[in-house]
Structures are given as structure tokens and as C-alpha cells.
Amino acid sequence: MGRTSRLLSVSAILMLAVTGSGCQQLSANVPKVVLLEYDQGLNFLDYSLQKTVAFINTDNGKTDYVSAVISARNHPHKVGNLNGVFLTFVICKISNTASKAEPFQYDVTKFYVVHAGKKFYAQVLEPYTLLHFDGGGVVEVLPGDVAGIQKALRNETQVGADQELIPINQEVYPYFRFIIYVYNAGLFDVKVQPKLIYDSPHPHVMSPRNQPPAVESLAWPNGEAHLNKLPTNCRPPAG
């Protein structure tokens, strides 16, 4: 494929992918559109922290400890048997080079996926959907635990700041990494690969590498993911 054909193909993709209502909005959006390429490189059930982390329980003010965070599998709760998995995403490329580009605000907390009809955001965990190991045994993550465990996971698994301003005429390969935890009741496919969505009014296109994620599907304490297993870059696009 020649250079002209490639340019036409990219333009066609942008025209089709930008969300808009009517030709006027579409033609206004495309000259400002930002392209974000991403790779979902790993799904895992359990994560073992590098070291035990102390945190303050927001319910009782006491100091609690966590040395592993474990996704709920066949764990009975009032909404049924919950089964979950962590999804690992890497932002491969951010291209802010459109003809009328404006500074683009990257914000990791605006990324989400839709699974089983529910939105799941980066850096957000919910009580009663996880287990954790506190040194004395495996316990359910209660409301007072959530903030501390979220922070422990974010500090160890995330690469890149929460927010980053991408100037105009910049094409960067940041390899920002973050995780999103999803769950549902009943049967669960640990290979789930939902579309990554960015919740922003800034015109943008999300472009996946479309390779299936690797899966760490064995249970703690022998099959959990840890820092050295998390992807640090992106695989090539599926051919």
C-alpha cells in the first residue's frame, strides 16, 4: 500500500470512528481529533504486592495490612456468586497532530470498560467484590478497606502520572499502564476483552492492538501476577 493510500485509510478510519451527530459536528471534530492506541496485554485473577502495605481503615480508623489482593471467585454475597478479573492496559501511542489540534488532557481516571452492562473505571474498586490477605488469613474487602487497597494497587501497578497534558503537534509513545477490575455474577470468562473507552468531550479515537490478552488464571498463592509479570510495552497490531 502506498503512502497516499495509507493516508486515505487513516482519514477514513477517523471519519468513521469519531462520535458525532451530523456532518457539521463530524467535520468540526476531525481536525481536532486525538488518536490513542492501546494494548490489553494481561488479564489476571490475583496480584501479589511486592511488600506488605499498611493502610488506615476508613471505617474504624485502625491500621490494617495487605500483602496480596485477590479477585473474588465463587464468593457468595448478597448479589450472588461474584467472579472477577483484573485487566491490564498499556497506552502505546498518543497522537495529537490533527490540523487544528488543541492541548489534550490525559487522565487515567477517565478510562473505563463496559462489562455485563456496567461501567468499570480505572483505579476504582468496590467493597465485597474482592478478597485480600491481611497476614492472618484471606478476608473480604469491606468498605473501610477500599481506599487503602486502591492506593496500594495504583502505586505498584500504574505507570505514568494520573494526569498528563499532551501539547499540540506531539506524537508520544508513553507506555502508560493501568488496571481495571471487572466482575459479574455467575459464569465468567477470564479472557474477557472489552473495548477501552475514554470519557472525555475532546474528540478522540481509541485504537486497540487487537491481540488477545495473556492470562494468569491460576489461583493464589502459586499463580498470582506480580510486578515483574505486568507488561511494560505494547505488542504489534494483530495482522
Image (cartoon, rainbow, N blue to C red):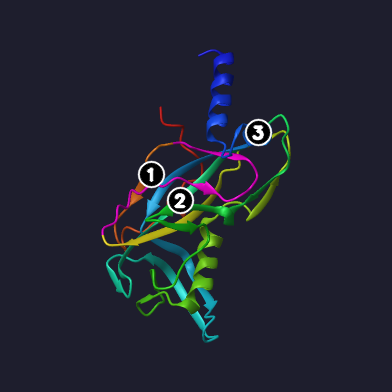
Q: Position of residue 95 (x, y in %)?
A: 63, 35
- Rendered location of residue 161, percent (x, y): 64, 54
The residue beneath circle 3 is 24
On residue 75, which mark appears?
none
Residues at circles 3 and 1 in contact by the CB criterion of under 8 Å:
no
Q: From mark 2 to mark 3, how far is it between C-alphas?
A: 37 Å
Which contiguous range is marked in magenta? 187-209
Closer to viewer: mark 2 or mark 3: 3
Q: CA distance from mark 2 to mark 1?
A: 9 Å
Q: In the image, residue 94 lies at what x, y percent?
A: 61, 39
Magenta stretch: helix, strand or loop mostly: loop
The residue positioned 36% from the left and 45% from the top of the image is 214
Query: Which of the two discs, 2 and 3, labels the residue nearer the N terminus?
Result: 3
Residue furthest toward the top? 2
Q: Amino acid at mark 2?
A: Thr
Residue 47 belongs to magenta span: no
Residue 198 is inside the magenta segment: yes
Can residue 140 be seen at all in this image of the molecule? yes
Local secondary structure at mark 3: helix
User: Which comes before the other along the chain, label 3 or label 1?
Assistant: 3
Instruction: Label 2, secondary structure: give it.
Output: strand
The label number, if any, that marks residue 213 in the structure image: 1
Q: Is residue 132 above or below residue 199?
A: below
Query: What's the amino acid at mark 1?
Result: Pro
